[in-house]
Amino acid sequence: MTGAMANFTKSGSDATARPAHIDVRGLTMAFGSFVVMRDLTFSIRHSEIFIIMGGSGCGKSTLMRHLIGLIEPAAGEVLYDGVNFTSAAPEEREAMLRRFGVLYQSGALWSSMTLAENVGLPLGEFTDLAPREIREIASLKLALVGLKGFEDYYPSQISGGMQKRAGLARAIALDPEALFLDEPSAGLDPVSSRLLDELILQLRDSLGATVVVVTHELASIFAIGDNSVFLDAETRTMGALGNPRELRDHTENPRVRRFLTRGEINLESAAHNG
Amino acid sequence: MIAQNAHSPSVTVDHDPAGTAVVRIGGSWRLRHGMPAAEPIEHALEAAGARAVRLDATAIGPWDSSLVSFVVRLEEFCRAKNIAIERGVLPAGLARMVALAQAVPETRGARAPQISAPLLERVGAAALERFAGTLRFLDFLGEAVIALGRMLTGRARFRRIDLLEAIQTCGANALGIVTLISYLVGVILAFMGAVQLQQFGAAIYVADLVAIGMVREMGAMMTGIIMSGRTGAAFAAQLGTMKVTQEIDALATMGISPMEFLTAPRIVALALMMPLLCLYSDFVGILGGATVGVSMLGLSLRTYLRESTGAILAATLIGGLVKSAVYGVLVALAGCYEGFACGGSSSAVGDAATRAVVAAIVAIVVACGIFAVLFNILGI
């Protein structure tokens, strides 16, 4: 929430007039000769909550790993604010990465560090803050995710849901402009998962960050998604693009509708036909 | 947002006619550029004996978490001192962030207590822990023996392919490193002997020295140490990771004994392969000695090898092979025990691997000493 946030708080309404935050153009993801997804083209606007959805194993997480440069695309490119990330020089790329925050599927907290140290590491590396100030900011971030008082715990001493929230605290340590969340609510109970959705909305509203969420939890998708892309495992490309609630009500693609309605409509119509 | 953005953050305190302290926040607040200290403000409020505080951020520039942290801290300070706090002009996003940070109260008693016990207590606790550790190891040893017994009588549950894979990794795959180390050890032994024995014109006895040295002690010991670093550490890391990812629990709840399924094949594989590696190591070591004998001492290869074979007694050779099998069991036990005792995190896996190597090497050296005494008594 550096420049982007100040701009957002001032002028959230003209966000649509700004160029897209993340632009994916003709992206093809492949492992060797095995193509996972091809010809993905979509844009993610500033301060938008963008959902990457699709069935298990269709390449959602792989797409996220492409967006943050952990995997190189087989074809196509990814642009941030009009700057080509895919072809950027390593130093330039590193500078761009510093403005991202990533929550990995299993939290990926460093097990030899306490929660405060986990959150404080990026602060120590990339700011001029004194150790005491780093500790204060780390406490604040942990408080934001509801983990106040757990600063001196090691990741192995807290529950899976708490690890996930601590991972989120680390992801927002540097007030990122873009936040990538891989299955944030997987393995959480409904109430915790609802609270996490609430937190994501709050963070977006107050930080003005763009949030990219990989998930297949329908409740979450409808609760927080502004925009979404559906990855179709059968055609190996995008099945639909748009607001998930509108997609549910209006999409023509049967696989997208089946996904967004848990296949219920299909069963009903099958029952009617039978 | 008023456009007088100073580049650095600013905080000032003044007092309005009603006696309320006004904390004016302005400038650009950036984590990357540091944040102003909160103490002077707190001191100023305390010194003025303020009963009420109003926050005013009319002159704020761009801001980030550093401002949120400052405001949260100031509000906590005011609450602690019973100072009424009023949020005047604050950016909308800021108020939301502050509310979010204060939404979940601090978990009581959550802060991990940092007890520093007196020295005597710590010594006692360490001694008790050592004792408990010994008991745990004996427990493990007993279970391992039972599992091996079941395996030998064909009642253990394990996959044959796992055993064959273990045999390959701790047998054939180790040949390269065993060759290199054994050859060099043979060369070193020969050099050491040559310097001394040449003075007496007894250079030919270098062959005896190298042959007996390799076959009796060095072959078994060097392969043991190589395998503890190579295979023992791998066992500990592998089983430790399986523990972390609950794979061992999954086996146990299916009624498959992890001891039979994981430990027994590994112990058997190492106990079978170590004597073979040791025999190979003996041979390569003698070749290393022969290189020195032929190139430096002017002995013919034929003479050297005849002298070597003459020096090796069957009992010495068998003794060395028995030792190596025992070392193999020790390495496998140390690796598996530390793997099963591993904690629940990735750093614990590293610790387990380290402890496995250290334990295996210590066990090998101790066993070597016991064997030396034993063989002496038996006259081998």
Image (cartoon, rainbow, N blue to C red):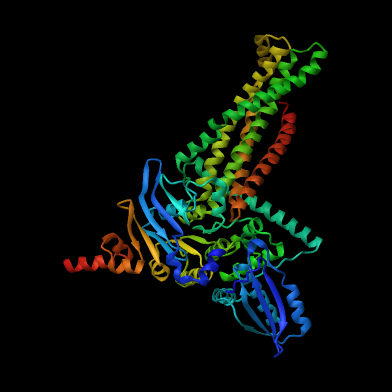
Q: Quadrant of the N terminus of chain A?
A: bottom right
Callout count: 0
- Indicate the position of residue B10 as horizontal and vertical percent values: 69, 71
**Residue B255 visible to an observer of this rendering:** no
Front residue of B158 and B112 = B112
Q: Residue furthest front?
A: B4
Residue B9 spot, x, y in % from top left: 67, 69
Question: Can residue B203 be spotted in the picture?
Answer: yes
Quadrant position of residue A224: bottom left
- Looking at the image, residue B325 sits to the left or right of residue B130; the answer is left
Q: Quadrant of the C terminus of chain A?
A: bottom left
Residue at 79% across / 82% down in the picture? Answer: B47
Is residue B210 positioned above or below A3 on the image? Answer: above
Q: Reply above or below: B341 against A34.
A: below
Q: Is residue B244 above or below residue A192?
A: above
Q: Is residue B86 depicted above or below A179 in this figure? A: below
Q: Position of residue B113 (x, y in %)?
A: 70, 68
> Between residues A190 and B309, which one lies in front from this camera angle?
A190
Residue found 25% across the figure and 63% down from its top: A252
- The front one of A129 and B80 is A129
Residue lying furthest right? B199
Q: Residue at the bottom extreme?
A: B18
